Image (cartoon, grey):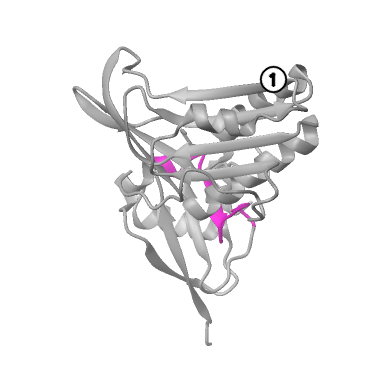
Amino acid sequence: MLFLTMHVRVLPFGILKDSLGSAASRVELPEGATVAELLDRLGKARPAPELRGIAVSVNAEYATAGDVLHDDDEVGLLPPVSGGAGCSGTGPLAPSADGREEDQTVSTALTCERIDAESLVAAARRAEDGAVVVFDGIARNNTRGRQTLYLDYEAYEEMAEKQLRGLAAEARSRFGVRQVSIVHRLGRLEVGETSVLIVVASAHRAQAFDACRWLIDTLKKTVPIWKRETFADGAVWAPGEPFPEEIAIAPTEAAHGA
């Protein structure tokens, strides 16, 4: 009996690169295999406790354990996010979610350059705004009592860009604010540099505060960006917050294909 097979491209990120290897790999599966079956295959070939509680993307979109894979799919293995080597991010700030320069209501970017917070905040202000609320995430000099030398941020860039644009657009709709800007650094950060900047402009302060808080809290749980911290006595991948239930793939799902 002839069994048809397919190949998918697997990309590990963050701490999973240490246990599964940093390079993308092609995995052969039976045609019609699911995400859960892929994880089961990977776990048997190279057991990694870090596979527990991860999220999985298929072609840069979050997937569930039961999703069926297809030939040439790109599968991302995503440990809980916390925010690597290399940086191919865009410039300081993309003009808008749809690329039209005249539409500045949503601006998002990944960048390898230092973030100029003062300029970005000034650019967001309009005469009709009653409030501009800013979250400026800064690389501090210590974590849990250990001296921090520098940070390295890594992203699944194609997916992270989609997630940032989606969050910015959702914040405008959900909270009724006029403008949202989000820019996140990638690559090497020195102590004192900005890692993520969120700027929300609105006619009223309450909506701007609520939108800014929702944006950073949601970004830290769902946007695929990871942080590696280098201390005076070693380096580790920063532990991320657990994924929301609708994104995380539970160990039982991975094991049994539920």
Q: Which residues are magenta?
A: 49-66
Give the answer, above or below, for where 189 lies relative to 16. above
Q: Quadrant of residue 84?
A: top left
Looking at the rendered structure, the kind of residue marked 1 is Phe
**Secondary element at image label 1:** helix
The residue at the point 57 percent across, 28 percent down is 121
Q: Is residue 39 above or below residue 234?
A: below
Q: Is residue 132 or residue 226 the one in the foreground?
A: 132
Rendering coords of residue 178 (x, y %): 75, 34
Q: Out of 2 and 7, give the one closest to the viewer.
A: 7
**Residue that badge 1 annotates:** 209
Give residue 149's quadrant in the image: top left
Find the residue positioned furthest to the left: 233
Q: Please state the total of marks drawn on the protein image.
A: 1
Residue 205 shows in this picture: yes
Rendered residue at 71%/23% (across/down): 208
Can the viewer see residue 243? no
Where is residue 117 drawn, in percent x and y? 49, 28
Q: Residue furthest front?
A: 127
Left or right, 24 with respect to 36, comes to: left
- The residue under the point 51% across, 24% down is 136
* 10 Å crowding of disc 1: few (<14), some (14-19), many (20+): many
| 1, 128: nearer the viewer | 128
Q: Is residue 54 magenta?
A: yes
Q: Residue furthest top?
A: 145
Residue 209, x across and y down, in percent: 69, 20
Asked if residue 77 is positioned above or below residue 251 in the image, the reply reads below
Is residue 128 rendered to the left or right of residue 7? right
Q: Position of residue 87 (x, y in %)?
A: 36, 49
Q: Residue at x 67, y 44 (%)?
A: 104
